[in-house]
Image (cartoon, coloured by chain):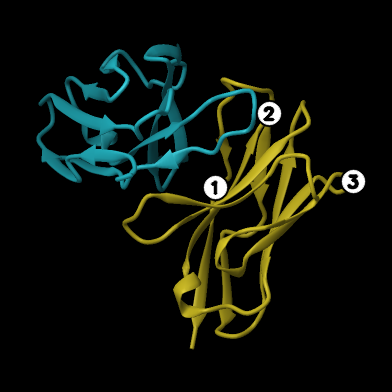
Chain colours: A yellow, B cyan
C-alpha cells in the first residue's frame, strides 16, 4: 500500500523568500510521485511529476522537487515566492502500473504575505 | 481542448433529494475518476473507470452513491437520497492510461450542499 504524509498543514512565507513544502511517502513499489496545486475554488493542476528518471524534477511556475529514496521524501521548493503562489499543494503517490490509483496527502496551504 | 467539464458547478438541495453530477472527460482519455473533497477527509477516490468499465468502486461510501459511464465522453455520479453529510466538492478527473505514467487532469469540481 502507498501513502503520503505532508508534514505541514500550513506554511507562511514572505514574497520573494524561498518556499519549502515537505512530503514523505511510503510505497510498496518504485513510486511515481506528483505535486498538484489547487487555487481557491478551482480544480487541481499538475505542478510536476517524478517517474524514475531524473531525481530533480522541474515543474511549472518555477517549482521543483527532489526525489530522495534514502529519505523517502519528495519535497517541493521554489527559490522565490510570488503572491500568486498562495494555494493548497498536494503531494500524491501512485504505485504499480496502468490502472493504479492516486493517493493524496492532506494538503499544505501556502500563505504568501507582501 | 476544453479540459474536463463538470456540471453543475454548484448544487444546493434538500436532504432526501436525488442529485446527479455530470462529467465530460478530455477527448481521447480512457480513464475517468470521481473524487470527493471535504475538510475532514481531504481528497478521496470514490470510483474509477477504464474504457467505460468500473474498475474499483471501493471508495463509494454506500449504496446511496452510484456512478455510470455509458460512453467514453460522459459519466454521472448520482446520490439518492442525499444527506447533509454528502456536502462536499466532487471532482472528476481523466487520464490516458497507457504503459507509461499518466497524470490525471481535473475538472473544476461541483460544490454540493445538502441542507
Q: Position of residue B16 (x, y in %)?
A: 12, 25
Local crowd size for mark 1, using a 10 Å CA cut-off: few (<14), some (14–19), many (≥20): many
Q: Which mark is residue B69?
A: none
Q: Position of residue B45 (x, y in %)?
A: 46, 30
| A109 relative to A98, above or below | below
In the image, which is nearer the foreground, mark 3 or mark 1?
Answer: 3
Q: Are marks 3 and 1 in contact (CB under 8 Å)?
A: no
Q: Nearer the viewer, residue A9 or A81?
A: A81
Mark 3 or mark 1, which has the lower sequence index? 3
**Residue at figure coordinates x 64%, y 23% from the top left:** B99
Inter-mark Cα distance, 3 to 1 = 23 Å
| Residue, disc 1 | A106
Local crowd size for mark 3, using a 10 Å CA cut-off: few (<14), some (14–19), many (≥20): few
| B28 relative to A40, above or below | above
Direction from residue A96 to residue B71 in the image, left or right: left
Mark 2 or mark 3, which has the lower sequence index? 3
SS at mark 3?
Answer: loop
| B81 relative to A108, above or below | above
Direction from residue A27 to residue A62 in the image, left or right: left
Inter-mark Cα distance, 2 to 1 = 18 Å
SS at mark 1?
Answer: loop
Q: Quadrant of residue B54?
A: top left
| Residue, disc 2 | A95
Q: Do discs 2 and 3 share a chain?
A: yes
SS at mark 2?
Answer: loop
**Residue at figure coordinates x 49%, y 29% from the top left:** B96
Chain of the residue under the numbered disc 2 shown in the image: A
Q: Nearer the viewer, residue B34 or B98?
A: B98
| Residue, disc 3 | A70
Amino acid at each position: 500500500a502507498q501513502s503520503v504524509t505532508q508534514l505541514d498543514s500550513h506554511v507562511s512565507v514572505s514574497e520573494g523568500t524561498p518556499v519549502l513544502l515537505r512530503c514523505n511517502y511510503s510505497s510498496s513499489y518504485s513510486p511515481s510521485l506528483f505535486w498538484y496545486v489547487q487555487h481557491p475554488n478551482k480544480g487541481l493542476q499538475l505542478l510536476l511529476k517524478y517517474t524514475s528518471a531524473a531525481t530533480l524534477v522541474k515543474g511549472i511556475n518555477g517549482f521543483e522537487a527532489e526525489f530522495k529514496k534514502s529519505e523517502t521524501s519528495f519535497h517541493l521548493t521554489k527559490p522565490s515566492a510570488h503572491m500568486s503562489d498562495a494555494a493548497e499543494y498536494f503531494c500524491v503517490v501512485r504505485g504499480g502500473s496502468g490502472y493504479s490509483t492516486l493517493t493524496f496527502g492532506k494538503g499544505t496551504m501556502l500563505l504568501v504575505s507582501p | 481542448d476544453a479540459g474536463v467539464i463538470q456540471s453543475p458547478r454548484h448544487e444546493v438541495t434538500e436532504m432526501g433529494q436525488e442529485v446527479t453530477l455530470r462529467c465530460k472527460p478530455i477527448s481521447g482519455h480512457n480513464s475517468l475518476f470521481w473524487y470527493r473533497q471535504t475538510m475532514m477527509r481531504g481528497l478521496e477516490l470514490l470510483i474509477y473507470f477504464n474504457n467505460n468499465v468500473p474498475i474499483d468502486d471501493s471508495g463509494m461510501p454506500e449504496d446511496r452513491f452510484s456512478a455510470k459511464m455509458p460512453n467514453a465522453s460522459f459519466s454521472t455520479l448520482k446520490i439518492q437520497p442525499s444527506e447533509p453529510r454528502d456536502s462536499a466538492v466532487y471532482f472528476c478527473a481523466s487520464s490516458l492510461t497507457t504503459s507509461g505514467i499518466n497524470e490525471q487532469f481535473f475538472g473544476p469540481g461541483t460544490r454540493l450542499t445538502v441542507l
